[in-house]
Amino acid sequence: MNIEQFQTMLAEKGISLSPHQLEQYEQYYQTLVEWNEKMNLTAITEKESVYLKHFFDSISASFYFDFNQPLNICDVGAGAGFPSIPIKIAFPNIHVTIVDSLNKRIHFLEHLADKLKLDNVRFIHDRAETFGRNPKHREQYDVVMARAVARMSVLTELCLPLAKVGGTFIAMKAQSASEELEAANKAITVMGGKLTTVHSFMLPIEESERNLLIVNKMKSTPKQYPRKPGTPNKTPIE
């Protein structure tokens, strides 16, 4: 996906990017590739692939959910900033908190935010399991997001405790979403959530399957969740 295609395809979805925003995506790409030589941030470094598989793919969440409002968003395990930073560039009014367990990635994100002059962003080095028990963050977010971090049953335990009652958990998945969902039904219920929608679509150009799973937080998550670090992954609620 070249820059013109990126701009045109987003415009077709009602997202009009200013020259400043386009420059921010370009700086994001340059910074990602530069830092990727020092540390492993992404296996995808070819420019057209980054624009398609990282930037456009991240922003695709906004085709099905309205980010055009001052939302407080938490992105769990964002790695190099996906999906929340590409969404933040397109929708500057949102507030973004990224939690990641690797301090090196947090340093990259801090440098990136400084370079792109992003405001209302913060980056926290922590495990999602301990972060979700911290009263400063537990049930504080309008939207909690994760992209390709873990199986849906595990993600649900890591993410739903952070969403406010009445808030939303958005999981971005490639294929096998239906199998993962079946295994995650119990976890979603236990964490106080209810699956409301699954949007399936094809990523343009390469025509690969994408799924956006939207879970509403109906009631508070029981105090014992999330369990201690490593437990959700070893023994998922299924």
Image (spheres, rainbow, N blue to C red):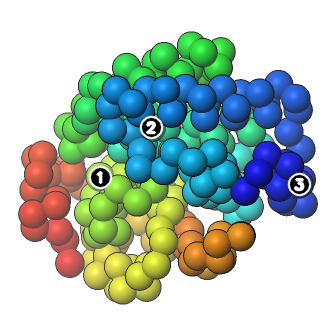
Q: Note whether residue 203 is visible.
A: yes
Camera-side residue: 117 or 158? Answer: 117
Q: What numbered label is drawn on residue 150?
A: none
Q: CA distance from mark 3 to mark 1?
A: 36 Å
Position of residue 229 measured from the top left corner of the image (x, y, whole percent): 12, 46
Whether 91 is drawn above or below 121: the answer is below
Seen at 36% across and 44% down, the residue is 77
Nearer mark to the viewer, of 1 and 2: 2
- Secondary structure of the residue carrying tag 2 is loop
Residue type for callout 2: Ala
User: Mark 1 packing: few (<14 Cα in 10 Å), some, or many (20+)?
Assistant: many
Residue underneath mark 1: 158
Seen at 20% across and 78% down, the residue is 238
Seen at 63% across and 41% down, the residue is 86
| The N terminus lies in quadrant | bottom right
Residue type for callout 1: Leu
Q: What numbered label is drawn on residue 80?
A: 2
Residue underneath mark 3: 8
Q: CA distance from mark 3 to mark 2?
A: 25 Å
Going by the image, does 234 lie left or right of 212?
Answer: left
